[in-house]
Amino acid sequence: MSCFLVITSSMSPCNFMHYRLVSTTDSALLTSIDSPTPSIDTTSSAQNPNQGGLPFFVGRTKSKQLPIYESKKRGGNLLITTVNHISGDFQKLNKQLQQRLDVTSAAITIKQENNKILIKGHHKSAIKEFLEEKKF
C-alpha cells in the first residue's frame, strides 16, 4: 500500500498549511486534488463595503461608534473636528463636507496618509448627521 502526502493551503487570513496522508486506494480524493482549485475573490469587501455606490467609506471604531472627535488647540482658540477611519476618494468626501457644513476649502485639511480629515470648527453633530444619512 502506497501513500501520498497532500499539502493544501487554506485561503483563511491566517494562511495555515494543512497536511493529509492519502492512500492510493482513495481514487475519489486523488481526482479531486488534481482538479483546479476555485478562485476566491480577495477584495476587501469586509473592510470597505459598498455604501450605495459612494466613492468613500468611513469605518466605525472598535466600540461601533462613528470616529468623529472634537478638540481644542492653541489654548482653546482653535477648534478642530477630526474624522478618522476614512478610505476611498478623499476629495469627493471633502467636496460633500464643504457643501454640507458651508465651509471653505481652506477650512478642511486632508491627511490621506493617516486616513483622516481635519475641519476647523466644532461640527461633530452636523458630520454625524451627514454620515448617518449616508448609512455609515
Image (cartoon, grey):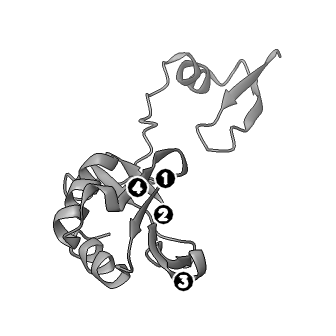
Would you say 114 lies left or right of 48 here?
right
- Which residue is the site of mark 4? 109
Residue 121 drawn at (x, y percent)? 38, 76
Q: Earlier in the sequence, mark 1 or mark 3?
A: 3
Answer few, some or many: residues within 10 Å of disc 4's Cα (few below 14, many 20 plus, some between 14 and 19): some
**Label 4 sits on what residue type?**
Thr
Label 3 sits on residue: 76
* Callout 1 secondary element: loop
Badge nearest the viewer, 4 or 1: 4
Of the two numbered discs 4 and 1 on the same chain, state the one appearing first in sequence: 4
| Residue 26 position by quadrant | top right
Between the C-alphas of marks 1 and 2, the distance is 6 Å
What type is the residue that disc 3 sits on? Gly
Of labels 3 and 4, the one closer to you: 3
- What is the x, y in percent for residue 8? 67, 28
Numbered tag placed on residue 115 in the rendering: 1
**Mark found first going from the N terminus, 3 or 4:** 3
Q: Earlier in the sequence, mark 1 or mark 2?
A: 2
Q: Report the side of 48 relative to 10 (left or right).
A: left
Q: Against 123, is 52 above or below?
A: above
Identified at 34% across, 79% down, the residue is 123
- Relative to 79, 17 lies left or right: right
Report the disc number at residue 92: none
How many neighbours does mark 2 have within 10 angstroms: few (below 14), some (14-19), or many (20 or more)? many
The residue under the point 69% across, 21% down is 25
Which residue is found at the position 16% from the left and 64% from the top? 99
Cα separation between marks 4 and 1: 11 Å
Q: Position of residue 105 (x, y in %)?
A: 27, 55
Question: Which of disc 2 and disc 4 is earlier in sequence?
Answer: 2
